[in-house]
Image (cartoon, rainbow, N blue to C red):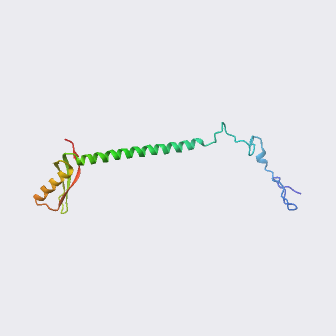
Amino acid sequence: MNADSNGAVPHCGGKRARTVYPALHKKGRNAGSKGLGKPQYKAGKPPGGGAMKRVWAALLVALLVTAAGVAVADTLTSSKQADFFAPGKHRFYVWCSNGGDYTTIERGLSAEDAQLKLYNNVKAKGRPACWPVWQGKIAG
């Protein structure tokens, strides 16, 4: 039988001859390969283990950032609630349906008390279409 330039023999009698690839048999290429034997890495550590560590580290950082954000938001919310029920000066945005909105400060035993006082003052001034909206407590 005649072999082609790669060393492959054409089919003969229903059997296929082995193809030889000379480029793979050069010294240096695939040298030391033992097929399906032991893995070629050291100390039982598979290659690419560093990538998994980076993923876990990124997840840990994301979790810590989220926890810190929740803690800050909770602190702000609880201080707002405490300010709402605290006595002192409270800032209000007075919203008027016919225009002429403004901001003002009112004293009270709580924000609700100050809002009710301000609402009665606004009505007494002849502006029944206005409603005070609490903005926060002012220190002092």
Kindly identify the residue that appears in the image at 13 percent across and 56 percent down. 120
Q: Is residue 13 left or right of residue 122?
A: right
Q: Residue 17: x and y, percent? A: 84, 56
Q: Residue 79: x and y, percent? A: 28, 45
Kindly identify the residue that appears in the image at 24 percent across and 49 percent down. 84
Q: Residue 104: x and y, percent? A: 17, 51
Q: Is residue 129 left or right of residue 73?
A: left
Q: Residue furthest top?
A: 43
Q: Residue 1: x and y, percent? A: 89, 57
**Of the pair 82 and 70, the residue shown nearer to us:** 82
Q: Residue 103: tell me if it is visible.
A: no
Q: Is residue 133 left or right of residue 61?
A: left
Q: Where 38 sits versus 5, above or below? A: above
Kindly identify the residue that appears in the image at 53 percent across and 45 percent down. 55
Q: Residue 72: tell me if it is visible.
A: yes
Q: Is residue 127 left or right of residue 66?
A: left
Q: Quadrant of the C terminus?
A: top left
**Of the pair 55 and 84, the residue shown nearer to us:** 84
The number of numbered badges drawn on the structure is 0
